[in-house]
Structure formats: C-alpha cells, structure tokens
Image (cartoon, rainbow, N blue to C red):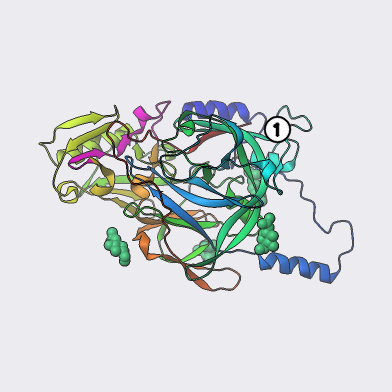
Amino acid sequence: MVLRQELLVGFFLLSFCLPGSCNLVLDVQHKFKGREKTPNELRSHDVRRHGRLLSIVDLELGGNGHPAETGLFFARIGLGTPPNDYYVQVDTGSDVLWVNCMGCSNCPEKSDIGVELRLFDPKGSSTAKFITCDQSSCSAMYGGGTIRDCKPDMLCKYTIIYGDGSATSGDFVKDYIHLQQAVGNHQTTVTNGSIEFGCAAKQSGELGTSSEALDGIIGFGQANSSIISQLAASGKVKKIFAHCLDSVSGGGIFAIGDVVEPTVKTTPVIPHQVHYNVVLNGVKVGETTLDLPVGLFETEYRREAIIDSGTTLAYLPGHIYHPLMQKILGAQPGLKLHTVDHQFTCFKYDENVDDGFPLVTLLFVESLILIVYPHEYLFQIRDDMWCVGWQNSGTQSRDGREVTLLGDLVLQNKFIYYNLENQTIGWIEYNCTSGIKLREEKSGKIYTVGAHRLSSAASIIEIGRLLPLLLAFTLFFIQ
Ligand SMILES: *[C@@H]1O[C@H](CO)[C@@H](O)[C@H](O)[C@H]1NC(C)=O
Ligand SMILES: *[C@@H]1O[C@H](CO)[C@@H](O)[C@H](O)[C@H]1NC(C)=O
Ligand SMILES: *[C@@H]1O[C@H](CO)[C@@H](O)[C@H](O)[C@H]1NC(C)=O
Ligand SMILES: *[C@@H]1O[C@H](CO)[C@@H](O)[C@H](O)[C@H]1NC(C)=O
C-alpha cells in the first residue's frame, strides 16, 4: 500500500498537500474587522464562546474486536436537523467522517451487525449545505492549497481509499453533529457543533457488502479534516481523547476531553505523519527478547508502529512476524496447524490458552510497554479451534509494504489515551467496565464517563466467513 500511496502522494502534492503534511494558509476574516466594536459586543461574543467551550464528549460504543464476530467498534452519532442517528465505525487511522447518502450507488442496505442502517438525506435536513470546491472550507479539508480543476459551483468532492482496497467517494456537506456532553457522573446532555463530512455517493470493495456494514466511518486522525480537529478548531473540545475497547462484553468507552483518571505512561507521536505513529523499540515473547536482524531498527521508518482502532488484527513486518510465530507456536510443539480462509493459522487446543502460550510484550520509547495476552492474540472460531491473530504485513498488504499496524487485537481491554495537544499517546491495562474520569475545562469539575454497549447482533461464528480484514486506515485522500 505504501508504494502506491507514495506515488500518489507525490503526484497530488503538485496541486495540494495531504492532510497534515503541509501548512494551510487560511483566509480568516475577523468578525469585527472594519468596524467599531462595542465592549458589550465583545463580551457577549466571549460569553457565547466560553459558554460552549471545551466540553467532555461521551461517545456511545458498540461492537467488539473479534475477527469472527463484528470485528469492529462503532459509535452512535446524530446528524442533521432534525437529528437522526447514524452508526459509524470509530477509526483512529483515518481523517474524515462520512456517511452513506440518499441515492448512493452500492451502499449497503442492511447489516449483519444488528443495527438499523439509514441514509443521510441532505434535502431532509434543514441545516445541510453542500460545499463547493472554491470555498476555503473545501481546501481546508485537503490541508490547504487550491483544488485542481475547480470551477465555480462544482461540489467539493472526496474519495478515500482504505488499506484493504475498499473505497468511498461523494461530496462534502456541512451540517450539525449531535453528541453527548458529560454534565455529571454518568450524566449527559445533547450538544451540537457544525462540521463538514462526506456524503457518500458510491462505495466499492468491502464497504458495499452487508456483513459488517455500518452507516459510515468516523475518522479520529490528527489532520484538520477529522471531527476532533474540527470540534477543537471551533473551541468545542480539547484535542485529547481516549478509548477503552471492551472485547469481553463488547462496546466500551470513547470520550473526548482531558482525562484525569486513569493516568498513563506515554510515548511521543512521531511528527509529520498522517497516522498515529509511535516508535517500537523491540518485541518480547515470554521472557525472550526477539533476536531481530541487525539493522532492522536502525531507521525510524522501520521502527514505526501505527496505532489504529479501525483495523481488527495486528500486522507485523516479516522480520518480526516469523520469529514471533516460531516462538508462539513453539510453546506447544505438538500442534497440528491448519490454514483457514487462506490466511489464518489455526489449531485445535482444548486447554487454557493463557497457560499454554507466552505473553507478547511490545516495547516503545520512554519505557512504555504493551502486553498482549494469548487470549487476545488468539481467537476462537469453534469450541476447541483457535487461530492466531498476528499477521504478516508483507503478505497481507496490497503492495507488500512491511508496516507495523496495531489494531483492536492489541488495543482492546486497555485504556488508550491520545493527547494531541502534547503529541503523545499512552495506555494502561484497564477493565473497560470501570469508567474513566475527565476534567471539564470551563468549570474544573470532574465527571465519570462509563462504558456503553450499543446492542448488536448475537455473535455469529462460522468458519469460512471470517471477517475480511477491513484495514480502515486511510491510504490517500484524493479529490
Ligand atoms: C490546521 O489548522 C490549524 C489551526 O486551525 C492551522 O494552524 C494549520 O495550519 C492547519 N494545518 C493544515 C495542514 O491545514
Ligand atoms: C445546537 O445547540 C444549541 C444549544 O443547545 C441549540 O440552541 C440549537 O438549537 C442547536 N442547533 C441545532 C442545529 O440543533
Ligand atoms: C502538556 O505537557 C505539559 C508539560 O508536561 C503540561 O504542563 C501540560 O499540562 C500538558 N498539556 C495537556 C493538555 O495535557
Ligand atoms: C471488570 O469489572 C467487572 C465489574 O467490576 C467485573 O465483573 C469483571 O469481571 C472485570 N473484568 C475483568 C476482565 O477483570
């Protein structure tokens, strides 16, 4: 994927920059420019701003990370006036919110996940407005610069291609998003904000099939086009959020705001990257540190790991994957291995996997570690049949790129904290049913936000229908 990505990036850089990769010069008009302002006017402007400043947002979650079940986590959001509910996959690996729109071609009509799908109807929302390509908000979605071949009245178009080759395209629309704002412990009220998002006119690949279909994807990436960046730019929230994805009961916590509990150790986010990349220093299996080839960790490029809630499994470069698998499977030399769905290494095992297989520990800079238990990296497809969740990124990605991509398989049952104000990410093992505490910026009050579990269909475990790997991290973003 990266080879293709880089070629396209190079090509498109001629006309505009990728989100997050270059500076945007926005033509901002000051509201009070060119006329006298009365102190009263200024004050009421400030009061209004402060009145809505920096709230805590509690996003309701559903789904689970099991490859043989839903394989993803989703949230409920409200859009439009009057507001309607939409179910969107939460994805820290991409930068745009889009939902399926009325008249869309190849959009799924029903979902095996057990949620009611709904098409967004721009004509049915009194506040929806399409954006044209000559508007500054269109170029802002593209990280600044002018849009190629833009003619007046042409809509601001988007196309996003995800890591599994699936794609969505349509037009950007501006409308209200309705979210739950924390106003007490486990208490919320509806808050809104005006945002820009994609109104999908066409889907291809996995996005058009019904098995894991949702209304769309909400990108929580760091580019200016993501919802967190848009809400932060309008003073609604701080650029800090956290999640706890519960693979035991499903759902979990997803909150925007300044978390005070639990506290975590953090590692820096590598700057100037499209995704949340952190530096991986090493890998341990049980007590053994993997003997990785010399030179593997020499360049920053090779050491990067992408943190991505929109990917189900965890992908490692061949140099890490092969010795890791050898150690894991070597713990039980008698195993008879089968390949399921041409892609998963599976075996029969009828004892407790946590007793029979080693822990995997990922080591990051500033001594942050991430422990993955056997019951997390192994998943069950039948009573006694287990499959390994670790994947070789070289053979799985479309262009053979050797990335380290850490999806729900390793992120689940942990509190994961993204502080974009300080460019750090951290985590700690956590029981997602416990709730977390956040501080409201304006009042200094501390509120508990608990777990949610939006209902979804009962688990369907069928061999031969394992989740096709939705790698929901954006590859590129083309006009
Ligand atoms: C993103 O937004 C910030 C603040 O609004 C601005 O300073 C920055 O230049 C923007 N970056 C890009 C790449 O558009
Ligand atoms: C947004 O919220 C404010 C304050 O609650 C409310 O007055 C306004 O009507 C809402 N706007 C929309 C479009 O829902
Ligand atoms: C960022 O880090 C500084 C220094 O450690 C700290 O004082 C500040 O509170 C942090 N800001 C946020 C938003 O976490
Ligand atoms: C998490 O906490 C809940 C409620 O306190 C408890 O029932 C559950 O067993 C805990 N889960 C784990 C994995 O410890």
Q: Position of residue 471 (x, y in %)?
A: 43, 36
* Residue 395 sits inside the magenta stretch: yes
Q: Residue at x 64, y 49 (%)?
A: 80
Seen from the viewer's position, the closer of residues 366 and 342 is 342
Q: Residue at x 55, y 63 (%)?
A: 56
406 left or right of 275?
left
Q: Residue extending furthest right?
A: 35
Seen from the viewer's position, the closer of residues 233 and 104 is 104
Q: For the C terminus, give its image quadrant.
A: top right
Q: Residue at x 49, y 31 (%)?
A: 208
Query: Quick check: is the Cβ at mark 1 less than 8 Å away from ligand 1?
Result: no
Q: Give the amino acid at mark 1.
A: Ile
Q: Position of residue 422 (x, y in %)?
A: 53, 57
Helix, strand or loop at disc 1? loop
Q: Is residue 91 visible?
A: no
In the rendered image, the vertical position of residue 210 relative to residue 174, given as above or below: above
Residue range highlighted in magenta:
382-403
* Residue 65 sits inside the magenta stretch: no
Q: Residue extending furthest left?
A: 334
Q: Is residue 62 visible?
A: yes
In the rendered image, the vertical position of residue 373 relative to residue 202, given as above or below: below
Seen from the viewer's position, the closer of residues 22 and 205 is 205
Count the marks. Answer: 1
Q: Position of residue 262 (x, y in %)?
A: 40, 65
* Residue linked to disc 1: 147
Seen from the viewer's position, the closer of residues 414 and 202 is 202
Q: Residues within 10 Å of mark 1 (few under 14, many from 20)?
A: some
Q: Position of residue 161 (x, y in %)?
A: 52, 32
In the rendered image, the vertical position of residue 448 relative to residue 143, given as above or below: below
Q: Residue at x 32, y 40 (%)?
A: 68
158 left or right of 117?
right
